[in-house]
Image (cartoon, coloured by chain):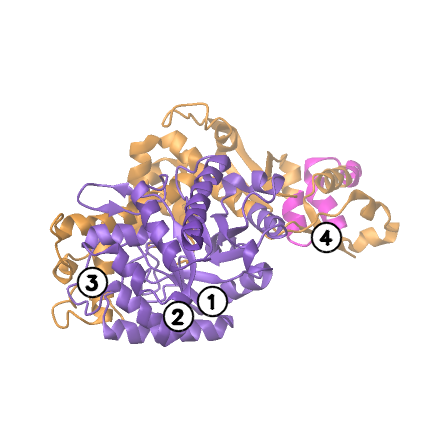
């Protein structure tokens, strides 16, 4: 597969399975949610295999809990490895967060304190996961709503240093940068500029819900103009990085998401023209 | 790290990663508010408002998972009562699994063993039915055998012939007409789905021959024979299972007829003799 074939993609969602299979070539790749396909069989696995025949895929998880003080979940890693063997994904991503401890899963992407202690802890675990999976892990910046008093580093310093120490890649979620920048009153551009260029493997785009005093990352709305503006900056800084749109609630018709993806294509094309001028 | 002393760890070393994570999780479980001391207000919002995004989100997310898993229960109970039982279950059964797919597994047993939900046996049966459907939905894929495979067997093979049902096969006995009601779940306003009591308990089976799950009720003799088949018994034993429900000389024909029906319905995964 050439790098040119993997540019603009969407999340693989059950609502669109049949349309995707019936109309190949509308996007260049899909991102599948790993946990949705950790099942023995049935419709989900059928459609995963069917659509994988036509498209490159990335696997995107929500339960690795890379920052947790719990031991790594070996059974989860086994299942992820089995799924990766089946899908042969371009890359495997998850989130820079923890999802629970004492063996429990809160099913939320809980932020970490940005401390040296956390950095050491996460870097060591990333290395172990990468050894286990036999590939580099791609970690995503999360939207967050609280700031730890204990944090010693900025989020962007933490991520950049983690990627160097653990030799992992970065899934740069542009909406999450925007959301967290609003919530924590930092400069979103400073965040983008701090990302090591060679580590940024993928972009996420998504919609959110504005509550006035804070923004919640809900993935249930179209992408807002300010996030598109920030996306243009991200494309300027990290040209050629594959982009995908996440939609997880109030999922619109496939055509609507394709139209939204065309906006991303247009922005990226505009940045290309700027660079060529 | 046991972490059983909920919420008591923040004060001693507020910067420790483990202490912060324990305090955060305890906060989501409403076991302790100590985590408030570990985070900051912003110029736009106080920390409690911001922490509520996580605390409220935790329960809301899992209520939504149960709503997706149990549309029949929602149709029976309506949003308010559904929310009540869902939140009680969430409080009693935190998720241990990486996927929310499995979170609702224990709801039927929880309701059956917990007042006031145990006083609504039809709702408990609806939940058991819906979970069995969801188990069948993504159970292992096995191609069912075709009828001609059995037709080709020599007569003597039938003496030791036994079968394996599809991994998706589930058998459930209901005192209420939950399967019939489930099919009407979208036709009524949530809370208005009536579930009648059956004249007598009826065994139902659920199975998924390809990608679509099927279900139907079983005659009494059919249920007895299916129990014997799932237990790995031989064809002569299957005939014995139906014998009490028919005259002896008709039992083999009845058993053969039922077996053919099951094979044609794609319920049988394999046989051996």
Residue bearing mark 1:
A77
Disc nearest the viewer among 4 and 2: 2
Q: Which mark is residue A72?
A: 2
Question: Which shade is chain A?
Answer: purple
Span colored in magenta: B225-253
Q: CA distance from mark 3 to mark 1?
A: 26 Å
Is residue A59 shown left or right of residue A227? right
Please determine whether, in this image, residue B143 is positioned above or below residue A95.
Answer: above
Q: CA distance from mark 2 to mark 3?
A: 20 Å
Q: Are marks 2 and 3 on the same chain?
A: no
Question: Which shade is chain B?
Answer: orange
Residue bearing mark 3:
B23
Residue B4 in the image: state x and y as whole percent.
24, 66
- The residue sitting at 46% across, 70% down in the picture is A136
Chain where mark 1 sits = A
Callout 4: 10 Å neighbours few (<14), some, many (20+)?
Answer: some
Callout 2: 10 Å neighbours few (<14), some, many (20+)?
Answer: some
- The residue sitting at 64% across, 43% down in the picture is B224
Q: In this view of the protein, which residue sits in the foreground, B122 or B254?
A: B122
Q: Which mark is residue B270?
A: 4
């Amino acid at each position: 597969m050439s790098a040119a074939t993997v540019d603009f993609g969407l999340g693989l969602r059950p609502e669109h399975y049949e349309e995707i299979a019936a109309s190949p070539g509308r996007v260049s790749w899909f991102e599948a949610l790993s946990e949705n396909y950790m099942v023995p069989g049935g419709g989900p696995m059928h459609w995963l295999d069917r659509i994988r025949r036509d498209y490159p895929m990335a696997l995107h998880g929500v339960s690795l809990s890379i920052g947790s003080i719990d031991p790594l979940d070996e059974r989860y890693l086994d299942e992820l490895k089995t799924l990766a063997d089946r899908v042969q994904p371009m890359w495997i991503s998850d989130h820079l967060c923890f999802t629970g401890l004492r063996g429990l899963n809160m099913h939320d992407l809980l932020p970490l304190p940005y401390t040296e202690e956390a950095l050491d802890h996460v870097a060591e675990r990333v290395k172990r996961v990468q050894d286990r999976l036999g590939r580099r892990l791609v970690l995503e910046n999360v939207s967050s709503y609280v700031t730890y008093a204990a944090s010693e580093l900025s989020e962007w310093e933490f991520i950049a240093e983690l990627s160097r120490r653990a030799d992992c890649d970065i899934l740069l979620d542009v909406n999450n940068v925007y959301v967290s920048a609003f919530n924590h009153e930092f400069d979103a551009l400073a965040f983008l500029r701090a990302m090591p260029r060679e580590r940024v493997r993928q972009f996420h785009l998504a919609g959110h819900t504005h509550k006035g005093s804070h923004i919640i990352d809900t993935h249930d709305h179209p992408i807002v103009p300010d996030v598109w503006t920030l996306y243009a900056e991200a494309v300027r800084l990290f040209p050629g990085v594959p982009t995908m749109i996440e939609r997880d609630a109030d999922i619109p018709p496939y055509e609507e998401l394709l139209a939204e993806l065309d906006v991303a294509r247009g922005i990226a094309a505009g940045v290309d023209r700027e660079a060529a001028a | 790290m046991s972490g059983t002393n909920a919420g008591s760890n923040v004060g001693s070393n507020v910067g420790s990663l483990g202490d912060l994570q324990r305090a955060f999780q305890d906060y989501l479980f409403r076991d302790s508010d100590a985590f408030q001391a570990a985070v900051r207000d912003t110029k736009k919002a106080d920390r409690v408002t911001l922490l509520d995004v996580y605390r409220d989100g935790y329960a809301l997310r899992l209520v939504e998972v149960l709503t997706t898993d149990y549309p029949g229960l929602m149709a029976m109970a309506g949003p308010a009562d559904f929310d009540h039982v869902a939140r009680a279950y969430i409080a009693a059964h935190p998720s241990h699994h990486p996927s929310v797919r499995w979170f609702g597994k224990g709801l039927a047993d929880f309701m059956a063993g917990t007042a006031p939900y145990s006083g609504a046996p039809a709702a408990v049966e609806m939940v058991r039915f819906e979970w069995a459907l969801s188990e069948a939905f993504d159970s292992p894929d096995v191609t069912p055998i075709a009828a001609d495979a059995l037709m080709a067997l020599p007569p003597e093979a039938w003496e030791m012939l036994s079968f394996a049902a599809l991994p998706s096969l589930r058998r459930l006995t209901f005192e209420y007409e939950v399967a019939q009601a489930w099919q009407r779940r979208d036709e009524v306003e949530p809370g208005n789905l009536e579930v009648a009591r059956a004249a007598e308990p009826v065994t139902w089976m659920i199975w998924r021959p390809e990608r679509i799950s099927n279900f139907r009720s079983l005659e009494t003799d059919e249920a007895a024979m299916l129990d014997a088949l799932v237990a790995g018994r031989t064809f002569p034993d299957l005939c014995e299972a139906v014998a009490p429900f028919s005259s002896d000389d008709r039992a083999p024909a009845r058993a053969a007829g039922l077996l053919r029906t099951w094979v044609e319905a794609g319920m049988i995964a394999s046989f051996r003799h």
